[in-house]
Image (cartoon, rainbow, N blue to C red):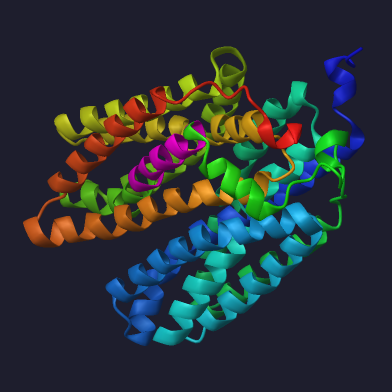
């Protein structure tokens, strides 16, 4: 007989959720604070804005390419090893970035930090929590983790700015490296195992290569992977170019900062709501709805005159939908294949997201350079979003769990 919901929130799950949420908050907060270093680095070292931007694009690619491998290592050896590796990579990447040279920025700020984020983001941490959570509370636990992960920016970013002002940009990077090192301590709270004896049993465990091969033969998985491209394309275009876009439209820089902060606040609420809806409407339907609502928000914002009010309303809407894809995507993977190989499978799907992220950041800048406006970029967001919503609706329900049944 199934246990009551309250009893399925075991002490091990709660401790793991706290540790994973702290690590995710630190990782995302550190990554999203790097933009604060652009101006002082350009002023002190002579590197260009384009150089810094390309390093961040490399970071997104490294994150996407590294995600399946980090997820597979976590599936095989557990979260402790992966997070400790990530903490070391983060520290090394920040140290190399502080050197101020092109090579240090590309390798440190781009490659190493990208791989570190791959090891401390949703693909790894959601998998750890999923394996400990019973099916009845798994969606709620994942939603809480994704919501908490957006809160680190409100602590790390202001702290980074204070360190830059009080010390120097190099000293501030050193302070961030200390925060990165603390993630290794949080990993000590993880433990191996889970509530699913079939998925956890060595006799039933499917190796990562076989799991990926079977997933790529699954129509729903492939469709969701292609549609996930739109998520990265839309979000990174907005995160990269929204402040410059509203500045061109004559709004003060403070509005851009307020918009980014509003995205973070609303993201926590939206992610929890998405997790709630997934349990009632199904992961496929919620995911398609998110793509549709995002695209409608972009279209309305693009069509209206840009003002403080329209910008903040747009930021709130996008924030509500920002990481709300994590519960339905993770629920779809768990529903199809179970949690045993979640890290590797999410990593494969996330590569599509990061290709979209790279193109969203890069092509957004090219569209402005070629035409003198962002109109081509905004229209591209609308087209890609509509296609993603339509494509996701053609996917099947996530009922079969073939990997678990072998």
The picture places residue 348, in percent across and down from the top left corner, at 53, 51
Q: Is residue 380 left or right of residue 334?
A: left
**Left or right side of 91 for 378:** left
Q: Is residue 123 visible?
A: no
Where on the picture, by quarter, is residue 268?
top right
User: In which quadrant of the rendered view does residue 45 lie?
Assistant: bottom left
Q: Is the residue 277 above or below the residue 53 in the image?
A: above
Q: Nearer the viewer, residue 43 or 288?
A: 288
When the figure is inspected, residue 34 is found, relative to residue 389, above or below; the finding is below
User: Residue at the location (67% across, 44% down)?
Assistant: 342
User: Residue at the location (86% across, 24% down)?
Assistant: 8
| Segment tinted magenta in the rendering | 220-234
Residue 81 x, y percent position in the rendering: 78, 64
Residue drawn at point x = 51 percent, y = 46 percent: 349
> On screen, 45 above or below 152?
below
- Report if residue 358 is visible in the image: yes
Above or below: residue 315 compared with residue 286: below
Of residues 212 and 97, the one nearer the viewer is 212
Is 224 contained in the magenta span? yes
């Amino acid at each position: 007989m199934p246990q009551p919901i309250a009893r399925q929130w075991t002490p091990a799950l709660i401790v793991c959720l706290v540790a994973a949420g702290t690590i995710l908050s630190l990782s995302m907060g550190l990554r999203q604070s790097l933009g604060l270093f652009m101006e002082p680095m350009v002023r002190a070292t002579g590197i260009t804005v384009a150089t810094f931007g390309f390093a961040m694009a490399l970071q997104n690619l490294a994150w996407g390419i590294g995600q399946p491998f980090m997820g597979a290592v976590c599936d095989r050896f557990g979260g402790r090893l992966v997070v400790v590796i990530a903490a070391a990579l983060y520290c090394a990447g920040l140290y190399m970035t502080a050197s101020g040279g092109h090579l240090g920025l590309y390798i440190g700020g781009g490659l190493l930090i990208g791989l570190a984020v791959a090891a401390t983001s949703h693909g790894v941490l959601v998998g750890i929590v999923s394996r400990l959570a019973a099916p009845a509370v798994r969606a709620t636990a994942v939603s809480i983790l994704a919501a908490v992960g957006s809160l680190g920016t409100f602590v790390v970013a202001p702290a980074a700015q204070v360190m830059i002002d009080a010390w120097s940009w190099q000293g501030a990077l050193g302070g961030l490296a200390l925060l990165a090192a603390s993630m290794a301590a949080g990993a000590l709270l993880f433990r191996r195992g889970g509530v699913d004896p079939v998925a956890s049993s060595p006799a039933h465990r499917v190796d990562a290569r076989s799991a990926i091969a079977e997933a790529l033969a699954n129509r729903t998985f492939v469709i969701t992977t292609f549609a996930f491209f739109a998520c990265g394309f839309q979000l990174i275009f907005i995160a990269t170019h929204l402040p410059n876009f509203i500045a061109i439209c004559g709004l003060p820089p403070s509005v851009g900062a307020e918009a980014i902060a509003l995205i973070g606040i609303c993201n926590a609420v939206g992610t929890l709501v998405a997790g709630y809806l997934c349990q009632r409407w199904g992961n496929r339907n919620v995911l398609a709805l998110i793509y549709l609502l995002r695209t409608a928000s972009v279209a309305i914002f693009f069509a209206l005159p840009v003002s403080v009010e329209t910008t903040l309303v747009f930021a709130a809407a996008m924030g509500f939908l920002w990481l709300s894809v994590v519960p339905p995507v993770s629920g779809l993977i768990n529903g199809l294949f179970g949690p045993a190989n979640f890290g590797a499978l999410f990593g494969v799907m996330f590569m599509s997201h990061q290709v979209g992220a790279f193109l969203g950041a890069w092509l957004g800048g090219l569209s402005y350079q070629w035409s003198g406006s962002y109109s081509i970029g905004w229209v591209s967001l609308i087209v890609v979003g509509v296609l993603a919503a339509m494509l996701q609706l053609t996917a099947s329900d996530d009922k079969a769990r073939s990997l678990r049944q072998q």
